[in-house]
Amino acid sequence: MTIAERIAKIRASLPESVRLVAVSKQVSADAIREAYAAGIRDFGENRIQEAEGKQDQLADLSDINWHLIGHLQSNKAKRAVERFSWIHSVDSLKIAQRLDRLAAPLSVKPQVCLQVKIFKDPNKYGWQIPKLLADLPALNQCENLQIKGLMAIPPSGLAESETFALFDRARELAEDIEQQHWSHISMQELSMGMSGDYHLAVKAGATMVRLGTILFGKRSP
Ligand SMILES: *Cc1c(COP(=O)(O)O)cnc(C)c1O
């Protein structure tokens, strides 16, 4: 199947309201053009440096929304704000505050998700739930960020039922936070679901799925 055929097939299987973010890490600029021609406007990258090269090659495709989905180191925060309209992987108060400070002089308001660790997972960045709840007042002060929702990534090795439970808990958490009516925190977006589990994420209420392998084929390890 071509990239366009894969996109058409996945798109047809998703509710219209779910945003398909094509994860283009390790994917060439040419393949990104193919996906663009097939209608994709949202692309996800996990490394700033790699993304910058491709963004420069694709500068003519000016209506692409670039999504940063990988852990962001604080020394690259400025480049992230300059280059991405979405940052899904805001995983600490410190990095949120840094992005907030950097955004003002650049006159941008990045759209961000807060990455949350629903289950214990030593390998993943993100807030544990109590810490996230405790940080909400400070996050609410980050007026240059548009806090849009949560991102959740299940640890590897979960059974399907556990994966679904994790996504479902993330949705509940977003609803709980939304109920608190913060002035600068909205919880409308749930970035969850990758090639292997997006069907479960969508069932649990994902609004953005981040798909790489299933669109572009296997990446080299
Ligand atoms: C690589 C990556 C994806 C896409 O994973 P696939 O299994 O290839 O669909 C999604 N989200 C994040 C954070 C990633 O790093």
Image: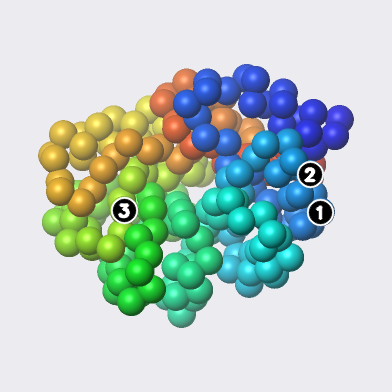
Check mark 1 vs ligand 1: CB closer than 8 Å? yes or no: no
Badge 2 element: helix
Query: Of the residues under marks 3 and 1, which one precedes in the sequence?
Result: 1
Badge 3 local density, few (<14 within 10 Å), some, or many (20+)?
A: some
Q: Amino acid at mark 1?
A: Asp
Which corner quadrant of the image does residue 150 belong to? Answer: top left
Label 3 sits on residue: 146
Which corner quadrant of the image does residue 39 belong to? Answer: top right
Q: Is residue 219 above or below residue 1?
A: below
Badge 1 element: helix
Badge 3 element: strand
Could you tell me if residue 215 is visible in this image?
yes
Q: Considering depth in this image, is 78 or 26 the residue closer to the camera?
A: 78
Residue under the point 33% across and 45% down: 148
Badge 1 local density, few (<14 within 10 Å), some, or many (20+)?
A: few
Contact (Cβ within 8 Å) of mark 2 with mark 3: no
Q: Is residue 95 above or below residue 2?
A: below
Could you tell me if residue 165 is visible in this image?
no
Horizontal and vertical percent position of residue 217: 79, 42
Residue under the point 60% across and 65% down: 47
Q: Considering depth in this image, is 99 or 91 the residue closer to the camera?
A: 99
Horizontal and vertical percent position of residue 21: 58, 42
Horizontal and vertical percent position of residue 196: 63, 33
Check mark 3 vs ligand 1: CB closer than 8 Å? yes or no: no
Label 1 sits on residue: 30
Query: Of the residues under marks 2 and 3, which one precedes in the sequence?
Result: 2
Which corner quadrant of the image does residue 45 belong to? Answer: bottom right
